[in-house]
Image: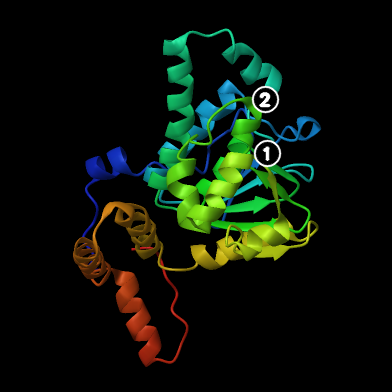
Amino acid sequence: MSDTPLLDPALQAGNRRPLAGYEARHFLWSLNDGVATITLNRPERKNPLTFDSYAELRDLFGQLRHAPDVHVVVLVGAGGNFCSGGDVHEIIGPLVRLKAPELLMFTRMTGDLVKAMRACPQPIVAAVDGVCAGAGAIMAMASDLRVGTARSKTAFLFNRVGLAGCDMGACAILPRIVGQGRASDLLYTGRSMAGEEAERWGFFNRLSTPEALLDDAQALARDLAAGPTFANGLTKTMLHQEWTMGIDQAIEAEAQAQALCMLTQDFNRAYEAFVARQKPVFEGN
């Protein structure tokens, strides 16, 4: 008999909702061996977002919090571009006719997408090629890891359309990735950041070729998916929560998180594999 207690069926029903059968409406979705791939799929327009795709992405990343069959997410655009931001005709045009309550409804929805991306426990790998602008740059920023290409152009171009650079958490998150001075440069000017500059500044974790980009991003995702996924989720949680903590608070939070990880079967598997001089096979529990 296994020493591992069975999960109460009622608890499981309320908190574990696999996404294997998910059918996306406004982008492409696939799930293989724990790696989910979201493909923004309007290549003829460089994959802009609409009200509908914003809402579906927000809701999907929310559902990922309860999806035990998804260990890592890859976010990519079709046709050689990542995402050109909000669709000029389907979002920007309607926005100029709305009143303040409806505008706030929209800006809160876009911010909720970023919050959902940061709150889901799965690491998100953005595969960035070509145009990565506006809300596209934000989604890349909100991902955990970014693989780019030399020909990519990332632009937080909000001030180019008469808006502030403080959009969807940019003033909070971007400085933590590239530093305050570099974030100020990008947010005040709205200029494009080429791929090699983005890697040099730390926005991209690595560069790939356009032809190998998706393969490289998915290979990175598979490596993460093969790791201790419960522990990876806690790493993501701590990276996010410790932004607002002092050092003493952070050390205590990490002590509690690490103690939880020491209770997992994956921790036991790692020890047993080390003793046997084998590579551990993690199962996420």
Report which residue position mark 2 lands on.
Answer: 87
Question: Does dot 1 land on a helix, a strand or a loop?
Answer: loop
Depth order, front residue of 243/76: 243
Q: Position of residue 283 (x, y in %)?
A: 40, 66
Tell me what residue is drawn at x 60 percent, y 25 percent.
162
Q: Which residue is mark 1?
A: 83
Whole-percent x, y for residue 275 in the image: 36, 91
Q: In x, y percent, where is residue 74? A: 59, 51
In the figure, is residue 142 to the left or right of 10?
right
| Vertical comparison of 250 with 91: above or below | below
Under mark 2, the amino acid is Asp
Give the residue displayed 79% in from the left and 56% down from the top. 210
Which coloring applies here? rainbow
Q: Vertical placement of 283 versus 276: above or below?
A: above
Q: Is residue 236 above or below residue 255?
A: above
Determine the image quadrant of residue 274.
bottom left
Percent across and percent down for residue 65 are: 38, 44
Left or right position of 79 against 177: right
Relative to 171, say whether 197 is above or below.
below
